[in-house]
Amino acid sequence: MEDVYEYSDEVIAKLGDAIVWTTILAAIHQDGVINEEERAVAIKQTHVRTFSSAEYLQPIYEKLDLHFERDFDTYTALLPEEYEKKEGFIQKKLEESMDILKEVGPVFTTEFSKNLESIYDKVFNANSTVFQSFAFPLLSAHLDRHKKGLK
């Protein structure tokens, strides 16, 4: 017997908004600019998750996939010009979107949060070069040793 996950239109819309705002936050985080690679990864990840995510998340991604690109561009246009204000603006929008999680329940909230972390990481790393992928862990390990007083 196949499980069916039904959500109200409001829940789907709010959780979809949370996904869109998460991808925008990931894209602007380092430099305040959304480049084409970050945008493309956000679109691709949302589409792929319509069939690759857990079954209880698929209805949300399926609905979002129908208008994700439009929402991404529309929401991006709402961002303040000043870099310093962008993250705060997005955080506020995320809080508004995720307020609906109170109605869904704690287990779903935990799993949805993990999913958001995953999509954030994919978009955030979209513009990373091979050198950055290789050098950053080495640099981090070196800094950690330095903090501990090891050489």
Image (tube, helix red, strand yellow):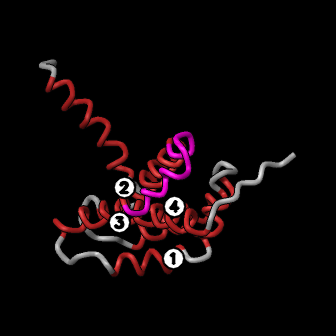
Identify the disc placed on residue 69.
Answer: 1
- Kindly indicate whether the residue at mark 3 contacts the one at mark 1 (C-beta within 8 angstroms): no
Q: Disc 4 designates what residue?
A: 15
Q: Which residue is located at x 39 percent, y 54 percent?
A: 125
Q: Can you see residue 20?
A: yes
Q: Nearer the viewer, mark 4 or mark 1?
A: 4
Look at the magenta stretch and give its main secondary structure.
helix
Q: Which residue is located at x 30 percent, y 42 percent?
A: 135
Identify the disc placed on residue 129.
Answer: 2
- Kindly indicate whether the residue at mark 4 contacts the one at mark 2 (C-beta within 8 angstroms): no
Q: Is residue 101 magenta?
A: yes
- The N terminus is located in which quarter? top right
Mark 2 belongs to which amino acid?
Thr
Q: Is residue 45 magenta?
A: no
- Counting from the top left corner in percent of width and height, residue 127 is at 37, 61
Q: Nearer the viewer, mark 3 or mark 2?
A: 3
Classify 10 Å Cα crowding around label 4: few (below 14), some (14-19), many (20 and above). many
Q: Marks 1 and 3, Cα distance to the nearest angstrom?
A: 18 Å
Q: Which residue is located at x 64 percent, y 60 percent?
A: 7
- Counting from the top left corner in percent of width and height, residue 3 is at 78, 48
Mark 4 belongs to which amino acid?
Leu
Stretch of the chain drawn in magenta: 96-109
- Counting from the top left corner in percent of width and height, residue 74 is at 41, 81
- Counting from the top left corner in percent of width and height, residue 65 is at 60, 70
Identify the disc placed on residue 93.
Answer: 3
Q: Could you say whether the residue bearing mark 2 is in a helix, strand or loop?
A: loop
Residue in front for this viewpoint, 27 or 53: 53
- Kindly indicate whether the residue at mark 3 contacts the one at mark 4 (C-beta within 8 angstroms): no
